[in-house]
Each structure stands twice: as C-alpha cells, then as structure tokens.
Image (tube, rainbow, N blue to C red):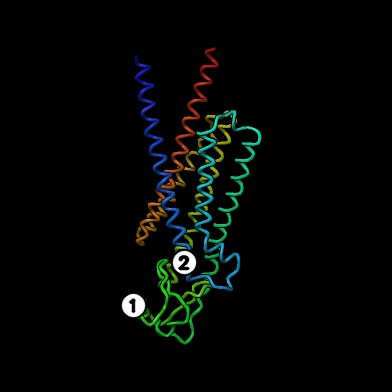
Amino acid sequence: MEAATSNAADERLHRIQQAVKWTVYTLLLINFGYYIVEDVVRATHTLTAQSTFFQWTSNFAVTMDEAAWFILLFMFELETYALSDEALKGWVARLLHGVRLVCFVMIAHTIYAYGNAVFTLQPTVPVEDATHLCDLADQDLSYVYNLKYTDITQETCNELSRATQFFRVGNDPVVSDMAGLGLERQLAWADVYEGIAWLLALLAIELVVRLQDRGVTGGGLMQTAKWGKNFLYLSILGVGVYWATLSHWLYLWDEILWIGGFMAIDMNLSEWRKEMLEEEVAAVQA
C-alpha cells in the first residue's frame, strides 16, 4: 500500500514538473519574439547600405544567440528525457552532437560580437561643430541612451539631451552624450560577462550529460560541475538584477526564464540519474 501511495505521489510530482517545464519553454518562446523585434528596430538605426556582413550579424547577435540556445535546449531535452538510451546511439548521437557544435559556434560568434562592441565603444570621438543636439537634426543620425534609439529630428532633439558635447557611439550612425556613452560601455561589458557565464554553464551541463552517458552518477568532477553551474546561475541572475536597475525588467525576466529552462534539464538529469541508480541496485540484488 505504501509503495502504491509513493508511486502515485511520484507521478503527481512528475506531472507538475512537466507542466512547469513546458510553461517555461513557452514563455521563453514568447520572449524570443520580442528580441527579434528589438533587433529589427535597432537595425533601422545602426545599419546602412554600406554595413558589412559582420555588422549585420552583430546587430542580430541576440536573435542568433537565442536561436542557438533554443536548439540546445531542445537537444538536451531529447537527450536527457525524450529519447531512450538505445535511441541515443550511432548516427542519432552524432547528429545531436553535431547540431550542438553548430550552436556552440553561434554562441561563440555572439560573444565575439559583444567583445567587438566593447572594443569599438572605447574611443571617445567627439562630434564636431555640435554644441546642441539640434545641430545634428535631420542628418540620418540617432541618439541612444540606455539602449533606447531615437531619430534626431527637429521635433525630438530638444527632449533627448541638454548636453553641449556629443560623441560617436562605435562605428554606427549613432551619437550620445558622455553619460550615454559611458552607460553603453557598461552595458557592453555586461553582455560580454553574461555570454561567457552562459557558455561556461552550458559546458558544465554538457559535462554532466557526458558523464551520465558513461554511467557516472557521482564523484568530484560531477560535483564540481554542479556547484560551478549553480554559481554561474547566481552570477547571471545578478546581471539580470543590474539590467532591472536600469528599467530593463524584461531582461531580468528573461534571465529567470532561461535559468528555469536549464533547471528543467537538471530535473531531467536527476530523474535519469535516479533510474541509473535503481538499475544498479537491481543488478546487485539479482
């Protein structure tokens, strides 16, 4: 009777976990749509007919990054939950690993693009012959502050900044005042750290998957990967809090959702590990 009650409780917990997991995945997909729109809007201010291929891919780095993470999440879901151990052999395993490698390359491109943004934002290049933002009106330039881009026109110039000196923002047709340029630099560094932290967390998850795929359920390397991953989650959440202090609440929400998404993968790994331990006990008892 106790065994039946325990099984029923485990089944209810499993259903709840699955409902939470797929709710998180759905919310992440909705957020993905927002980031696509955000990148398109930014492109209207930063890209021109003379923009290079790298400038285009850098502008849409977030879209590419999110796409890569979604594919990775799907791959991990297949490997840690949906597919059996027998199915994860041969060409299926090679295909999953190959797709994941492509996603790693896409994420690496994003981190490189973030690093390049930090580099291009370092020069402090003043805009000549402009002591008021209205001096730059109707010249196909945009003003940016806290990631908000606004076309500089006679109607908007008086509302955007009261500064008397303005600076180029990277290599884009964008300007800002000193406070805005400084903030853009800080946000660029936050992007770099966040990208690297997520990549390290991904490597930790990959390590756990590979270890369990080889029948390893414990040990120092496994524990190091788990604790390291949790520390990275906390630091990423800290970056999200920083975004929130600048009124980018959606970015904090996105961080929470992605952490939730990969914690769902952690739940899959825990169930997988439990099954492996139960099989070991059954083998010993036999």
Q: Is residue 132 above or below residue 202?
A: below
- The location of residue 273, given as percent across then percent down, is 50, 29
| Residue at 57% over, 66% down | 55
Q: Is residue 217 above or below residue 147?
A: above
Q: Nearer the viewer, residue 109 or 139?
A: 139
Q: Quadrant of the N terminus?
A: top left
- The location of residue 70, given as percent across then percent down, is 50, 47
Q: Residues within 10 Å of mark 2 (few under 14, many from 20)?
A: some
Q: Amino acid at mark 1?
A: Glu
Q: Tell us which disc is closer to us: 1 or 2.
A: 2
What label sits on residue 42 in the rendered view?
Answer: 2
* Residue extending farthest top: 286
Q: Nearer the viewer, residue 102 or 286?
A: 102
| Residue at 60% over, 65% down | 53
What secondary structure is found at the residue carrying circle 2? helix
| Residue at 40% over, 44% down | 24
Q: Are marks 1 and 2 in contact (CB under 8 Å)?
A: no
Q: Residues within 10 Å of mark 1 (few under 14, many from 20)?
A: few
What label sits on residue 47 in the rendered view?
Answer: none
Q: Is residue 58 above or below residue 30?
A: below
What secondary structure is found at the residue carrying circle 1? helix
- State the residue position of label 1: 159
